[in-house]
Image (spheres, rainbow, N blue to C red):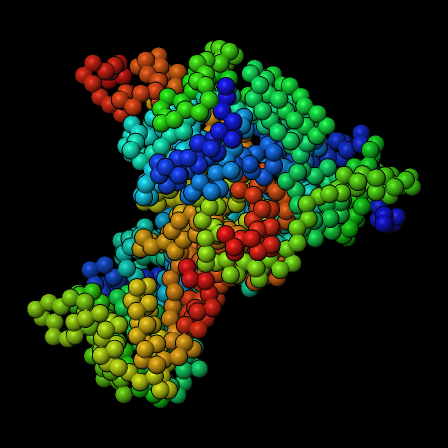
Amino acid sequence: MVDQTKSRIIEKNRLTELLDKLAQDYHLIAPVRDNNVSFRRVESGSEVTLDYINTVLSPKNAFFPQTETLFRFSRDDSRGFRTEPGAEADREQVIFGIRPCDARSLRLMDMVFNGQYKDSYYLDRREKTTLIGLACFDPAETCFCPTFGIDPASGEDVDILLSDIGDRYLVEASTEKGAALLDRFAEFFAELRGDEEQLREARKAGLAGMKKLDVSAIADKMAPLYEGDYWDSIGMKCLGCGICTYLCPTCHCFDIADVSLDEGGERFRCWDSCMFPEFTLMASGENPRPNRKARVQQRFFHKFKYFHDRNGELACVGCGRCLRYCPVNIDITQIIEDVTSGKAGNE
Amino acid sequence: MSENIYLPRMATIQSMRPETIDVTTFRVTIDGSDGTGKFEYKSGQFAEVSVLGVGEAPISITSSPTRPEAIEFSIRRVGELTNALHELEPLDKIGIRGPFGNFFPLEEMEGQNLLIIGGGIGLAPLRSVILNVFDNRAKYGKIDIIYGARSPQDLVFTSEYKEWQAVDNTRLHLTVDRGDEEWKGNVGLVPTFLREINPSPENTISITCGPPIMIKFVIEALNELGFSSEHIITTLERRMKCGVGKCGRCNIGSKYVCLDGPVFTLKQLEEMPSD
Amino acid sequence: MKATSEEVQTSVKKLFEDGSIGHFIGYETGSDSLHVTPCFLKSGQAASRLVWNPLCANNLSKYLLDFKNVEGKVGIMVKGCDSRSVVELLKENQIDRDKVFIVGVPCSGIVDREKLLEVLGISPGEVVAVEDDGDAFLVTIKGGTQRVDKEKVLRGECLVCKYPTPLVYDVLLGEAVSSLPWVGDDYSLIKEQEALSSEEKALHWNREFSQCIRCYACRNICPVCTCTECIFDKKAPRWISKANDVSENLVYHLVRAFHVAGRCIDCGECERACPMNIPLRSLNKKVEKDLLELFDYTAGIDVEQQPPLTTYQLGDLDEFL
């Protein structure tokens, strides 16, 4: 139900203007069409495209950049170094147009970057970010987010949800942060006209028939597949590239390395992938995951068992990027079906 | 911004003691405002050691928390970072993060006999236990240390053996894979030597560290000798980067070696996938 | 006549039965009717999974490297372009001709999925099948069949393909295709870029490479990227930083382009694999054109012909010295 008190509308022709304003007051990150549609920092509303199902890269870059300075160092007068932390998190940022699946992925990422040791870089950005989501009514054929209990038309994991209902967007704040932003830019929003709920329900028709797999017992069903040859053919097919992990909104692995300049340098982290052989290669030359099969297995076990064992959730939001962009068409939904149906153990 | 878990504390190398041709023991103090920064750790834990500009690697702590004057790391030259460390000199600065990981259950081991089995540089984390129990000698029963290396030149901490042997109710059994003219001790692989020594599993906890292949056969021998899998403790090595369970590379099944390890009982290992 | 999936199935089954092969690498239907996926067979029983249609884009020849140490021969399905990378692999002794059984299929062009969906204005779920029909594709859509001109929806490399029929094979299924009617100027793709100044070129490629995420899909899928340890993976010395930075990305792509110079056969796999849509073919095409003009050399034609950049002769051009 539309909550009358917290909901507004915005006319479609006022959106660019709102985005212009947001870009002035915040770091605005929104979908931009270049060679593909991806989230980028924008300076004005006209750069933003809303004609996309989902972006190629998930917005994880805005919290966990592909490359990020952890700290800088410089030689001091004695034989030592002075260190200074990397850039403080940027000022307050707004992510505009995040899809409900990607918004859910942040909840999973939080589990990694929070905990006993707190990753201040990620958590700081998270705290300083307002998420403006865009409800999905025309999912791609590769989408399967309902599998993980995600409602593509819901604002559960965002601060504000926009739903395209024809000539206007229904705008719903679901957090204090969201409500505050609506207040601040109140001039752009109008009162509901009354037919919004009905219009939204009509648009939801596009969601009927979305793929929804039963993953309730998948973690238990993965366990016996550790041994056995189910992963042989998938490992054989896999190219060992980083597309699936880099595009995945829940993959969080990284490497840490130094750059050395004349009198100092910096330590940075950058995305890394369990698909790469060097990911686990030790200085001694030993590699506990020596082949593509072992690495493919790690990826799916991490998603559907290990992450679940540690955090009680599955590390997938059904965005379908890994399937859509895999050059050899490795199909995560097929793997889920094989595992949950028991077919995987009987090959 | 809250504390930066990736920022190392600066530390000073106080001395570098060559152990073998490619192993050096670095004695290090943490730089604090008063020059004696605190670094509280337990035997079995590791630290992320940095040479700024080169990188960082997980290194097990080889000193004992019972001797808080300095922290020691015995490091073999194997990769980029350890090579860079060996190029440093006393009074040079390094970075330290940690301590990380779990530790040997020394309190649970009180009242028990200890069987400590090491191979090569694997004696480094075990030395932390050895010195620790020596400093609390009354709390433990008989101590047997079985240690082997490829050759007499590859044995580490040789300058301390006399001291160790002089400790009450303690025996040090040395072996090498290949002897030389001067070597008078045992020649043979550690697992074989262990079988010959034939220690009793009764009231005894065994802890072992060394090359993976040695650990594998030592565990086999300990099983034969009647040690239960709860009483066989080992430490594991994996490629690690962050040390704090985020970077995602050191897992064995659902366990992160950096957070949940590196110390595991054989019973725990048996419940983990075999990679 | 064009080979059909049934012909491929029958033929592969027979090869297993008469002991000609112990393994087979082909295509099977993928996640939907617009995708195929590589298929690995160990016996003829599952040969009915194999398909051959205008969606079979993948160049499977790189997988031959994974079969170097298996018993018996490995069979593989190759199109014209794929056969040229097999020639390159043979040239470099990466594979043993006696251990490979090549099932050649003449190819009249592969569909570019994105172009097809755009031309038809439909979503992928609506497509039931795509068939070859001379200078057009017959696309079966829920509720009917549409004929789409090939020129509008072909993959870029197919628009300039001069070798539709495999150059090396043990058996050829279907009739050889000598030339494709739409193939014209090979290098129109790079004409515009060649006219740019150095500064403009730098600007162009910096913009493109700033989008690279260094997933290494272009390298990993490339049939002539065969190094067991790539210099970009080497830890000591590290040739490029793992930091994603346009200058590092540029070094990666330029070194790769030079490394496949004279070996790239324009199968287009790098560009197809790139999730960021970086137009990698135009980089390789330029190098290809230079090699043709300087050395009259085309890669992947003849096993005996050595690549000009890895051989040395006294009469070689040396203007740069």
Q: Is residue A262 left or right of residue A140?
A: left
Q: Position of residue B231 (x, y in %)?
A: 40, 79
Q: Position of residue C165 (x, y in %)?
A: 42, 20
Residue furthest right in the image:
A194
Q: Is residue A142 left or right of residue B256?
A: right
Relative height, residue A47 to residue B1 (above, below): above
Residue C291 sits in quarter: top left
Compare residues B110 and A69 and report the one nearer the observer.
Answer: B110
Compare residues A306 and A259 and report the one nearer the observer.
Answer: A306
- Residue at image x 45%, y 53%? A229
- Residue at image x 56%, y 49%? A335
What is the tally of numbered marks visible in this picture?
0
- Residue at image x 50%, y 52%? A347
Relative height, residue B248 to residue C231 (above, below): below
Relative height, residue A341 to residue B228 (above, below): above
Q: Position of residue B42 (x, y in %)?
A: 42, 73
Residue furthest left in the image:
B181
Compare residues A60 and C206 and report the one nearer the observer.
Answer: A60
Q: Position of residue B133 (x, y in %)?
A: 35, 81
- Residue at image x 7%, y 69%? B181
**Residue A323 in view in this figure:** yes
**Residue A104 in view in this figure:** no
Q: Is residue A334 left or right of residue B158?
A: right
